[in-house]
Image (cartoon, rainbow, N blue to C red):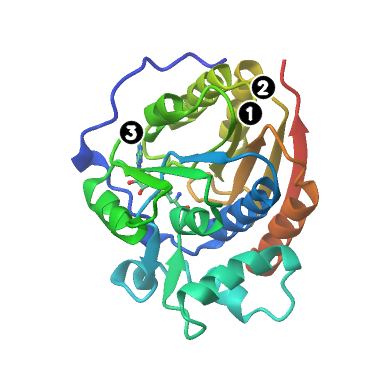
Amino acid sequence: MRTPVPARSPKPLDALNYRHAFHAGNFADLVKHAALLSLLAELTAKGPPLTIIDTHAGRGLYDLGGPEARKSGEAEAGILQLMRAKDPPPELARLTGQVSAVNGGGAIRSYPGSPWLIAQALRPADRYVACELRPDEHEALRVILRGRPNVRTLCVDGYAAAVKECPPTGRVLVLIDPPFEQADDYDRIVRTLAAVRRRNRTAQALVWLPIKDLETLDAFLRDLEDEVAAPMVVAETRMRPLADPMKMNGCALVLVGGPDLEAPLAAICGWVAQALGAGGGARIYPLAPQ
Ligand SMILES: C[S@@+](CC[C@H](N)C(=O)[O-])C[C@H]1O[C@@H](n2cnc3c(N)ncnc32)[C@H](O)[C@@H]1O
């Protein structure tokens, strides 16, 4: 494992500069949210109640007509392209259906984040805990999810909450989707997953990561193999050759503890890389825990 970063509190809130409103509906959201919907469909098709813990929830619903989305143009290059596409694979249909639904079947002005998608998928006995550290983002999240009896929103550090809120028995899915603005995000993901799996041996997880350069991704995956004893699958979506490590050249998902989603992940990542990228590609492969 890399030299561990000493445990510390998150930075003061005014240092949390990240705003997902600039990025909502971009290529990385399409991959993450289409994969999340495929995973939720599997996990809620049958079986006992499921607890879902979303460590970095965001505000839940994003205004694509707002200044942030208009300035970045990322939704235009992402969800708006997908909504106009003639032949996307069926594995993207759950996401396009949810996006159409939040827009009442009309022009696409809003984009649903993970909290909205998860809340829609819950069965009556399932539970959802959505964690968001920024008070303003948390307040927006609380408002859009209010009145749902099996949903709790917490304005807390999501890494700590994932372990605290994880039931020791029963079915659990943890979604980890940090902004990667803090130097220790990679180490905190590994430590959180290891602690969650120690607390509940069958806990499953979906982790989102940016791909800038391969060294960072490979070091993270080696740490995961060393520290987390679970079957894991990596799905890479590369949007372009990794020539400039200062850019987000793609993204990766790590699915911890199954189920088998290899075919849908290949379809989702492959379409996004090919239709929205420039010379990239997709790769799905297993990790081998020590
Ligand atoms: C990438 S966005 C989340 C997007 C969301 N998962 C989705 O798919 O719609 C990351 C969010 O994490 C929040 N955040 C940053 N550090 C956090 C922490 N330690 N615990 C909880 N939330 C945090 C940020 O304010 C931001 O809203």
* Residue that carries the numbered disc 1 in the rendered image: 221
The residue depicted at 66 percent of the width and 54 percent of the height is 41
Q: Secondary structure at mark 3?
A: loop
Kind of residue indicated by mark 2 = Glu
How packed mark 1 is, by other alpha carbons closer than 10 Å (few <14, some 14-19, many 20 or more), is: many
Kind of residue indicated by mark 1 = Leu
Residue 77 visible in rendering = no
* Residue that carries the numbered disc 3 in the rendered image: 157
Q: Earlier in the sequence, mark 2 or mark 3?
A: 3
How packed mark 3 is, by other alpha carbons closer than 10 Å (few <14, some 14-19, many 20 or more), is: some
In three-dimensional space, the C-alpha distance between marks 2 and 3, rounded to whole angstroms, equals 25 Å
**Ligand 1 within 8 angstroms of badge 1 C-beta:** no
Residue closest to the eye, 247 or 174? 174
- Depth check, mark 3 against mark 1: the one in front is 3
- Determine which quarter of the picture holds residue 280: bottom right
In three-dimensional space, the C-alpha distance between marks 3 and 1, rounded to whole angstroms, equals 23 Å
- With respect to residue 42, does 155 lie above or below? above
Q: Position of residue 225 (x, y in %)?
A: 66, 22
Q: Position of residue 231 (x, y in %)?
A: 73, 28
Label 3 near label 2: C-beta < 8 Å? no
Residue 29 visible in rendering = yes
Q: Answer with left or right where residue 29 lies relative to residue 17.
A: right
Label 2 near label 1: C-beta < 8 Å? yes
Label 1 near label 3: C-beta < 8 Å? no
* Residue that carries the numbered disc 2 in the rendered image: 225
Seen from this angle, which residue lies furthest right?
A: 263
Q: Secondary structure at mark 2?
A: helix
The residue depicted at 45 percent of the width and 59 percent of the height is 116
